[in-house]
Amino acid sequence: MTDAPLWVVAGALAGPDARWLMHRRPLNKAHGGLWEFPGGKVEETEIPVESLVRELHEELGIILKAPDCTPVCFAEDHRKSGNRPIVILLYKITNWVGLPQALEGGEVGWFSAQEAMKLKKPPLDEQLAAHLFEK
């Protein structure tokens, strides 16, 4: 086991109707069936916002620019799982090109903040949602 954390980025896409995009994980993956903010791992050669731009293009088929990604908060697992620690950096996004689709499986949906808070989510996404929506 390595002590280095796994850095992950996630995007909170805010629609013009005050709804937020959430991604439901494919059933065959870890946390399958749970809802999350879309995103993925930060590659060794990238800074986090570059990873976010790449990941959301791969996962959702949208195009966005780094200046349109505003850092909001982060969540970490404090090694509770006994595995490699995970740190998720959440960015708010209000401007992109394209219609978000679940290109890598699962599904996407648009939810009010109240609806998003009620969705079953992985623990770190619960923390991120609480910070984002309960301000």
Image (cartoon, rainbow, N blue to C red):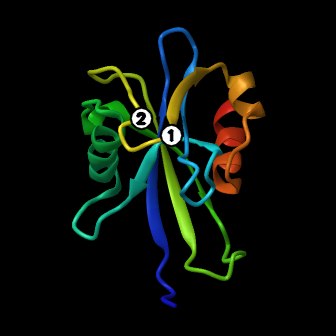
| Viewer can see residue 69 | yes
Give the numbered dot on residue 106. 1
Kindly report the distance in space between the C-alpha atoms of the residues bearing marks 1 and 2.
6 Å
Q: Residue at x 54, y 8 (%)?
A: 17
Q: Position of residue 45 (x, y in %)?
A: 22, 67
Which residue type does callout 1 highlight?
Answer: Gly
Q: Are marks 1 and 2 in contact (CB under 8 Å)?
A: yes
Name the residue rendered at 33%, 47% in the picture: 55
Q: Is residue 95 left or right of residue 116?
A: left
Check the image and name the residue furthest to the right: 118
When the figure is inspected, residue 2 is found, relative to residue 49, above or below; the finding is below
Q: In the rendered image, which quarter is residue 40 located in?
A: bottom left
Q: What residue is rendered at 35% in x and 37% in y?
A: 103
Identify whether 30 is placed above or below 116: below
Q: Amino acid under label 2?
A: Ala
Which residue extends farthest front?
A: 28
Q: Residues within 10 Å of mark 2 (few under 14, many from 20)?
A: some
Mark 2: secondary structure: loop
Query: Can you tell which mark lies on residue 77?
Result: none
Return the mark for residue 102.
Answer: 2
**Local secondary structure at mark 1:** loop
**Is residue 46 depicted above or below 93 in this figure?**
below
